[in-house]
Amino acid sequence: TLGDLGLVAKASRRTQALMKKPEPLTVINVLKAFRDIAE
């Protein structure tokens, strides 16, 4: 059972459109993201 909050999250995730396809999770992309956060 998901509960009310789980059902709401599941429904909103299903209807949420992505602006663009996310980049694949590669080691280089993850390290770049960490460096960007650290700046």
Image (cartoon, helix red, strand yellow):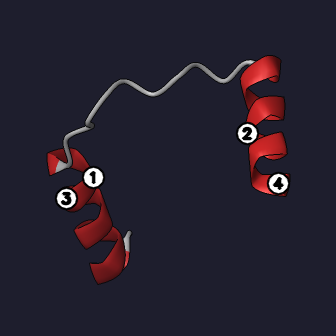
Q: Nearer the viewer, residue 29 or 39?
A: 39
Q: Secondary structure at mark 4?
A: loop
Q: Secondary structure at mark 1?
A: helix
Residue 22 drawn above or below residue 2: above
- Percent across and percent down for residue 5 are 33, 79
- Residue placed under numbered mark 1 in the picture: 13
Tell me whether circle 1 and circle 3 mark residues in contact (CB < 8 Å): yes
Q: Secondary structure at mark 2?
A: helix
- Point out the tag, 4 or 3, that comes first from the N-terminus: 3
Is 16 on the left or on the right of 24, as rendered?
Answer: left
Marks 1/3: CA–CA distance: 5 Å
Q: In this view, which residue lies farthest toward the bottom?
A: 4
- Residue placed under numbered mark 2 in the picture: 33
Which mark lies nearer to you, 4 or 3? Answer: 4
Tell me whether circle 1 and circle 2 mark residues in contact (CB < 8 Å): no
Query: In percent of the image, x 72 and y 24: which residue is there?
Result: 29
Q: Splitting the image into 4 quarters, where does residue 24 fall?
A: top right
Q: Nearer the viewer, residue 38 or 2?
A: 38
- Point out the tag, 1 or 4, that comes first from the N-terminus: 1
- Residue placed under numbered mark 4 in the picture: 39
Which mark lies nearer to you, 1 or 2? Answer: 2
- Percent across and percent down for residue 8 are 24, 71
Residue 11 circle label: 3
What crowding class fits label 2: few (fewer than 14 Cα within 10 Å), some (14-19), or many (20 or more)? few
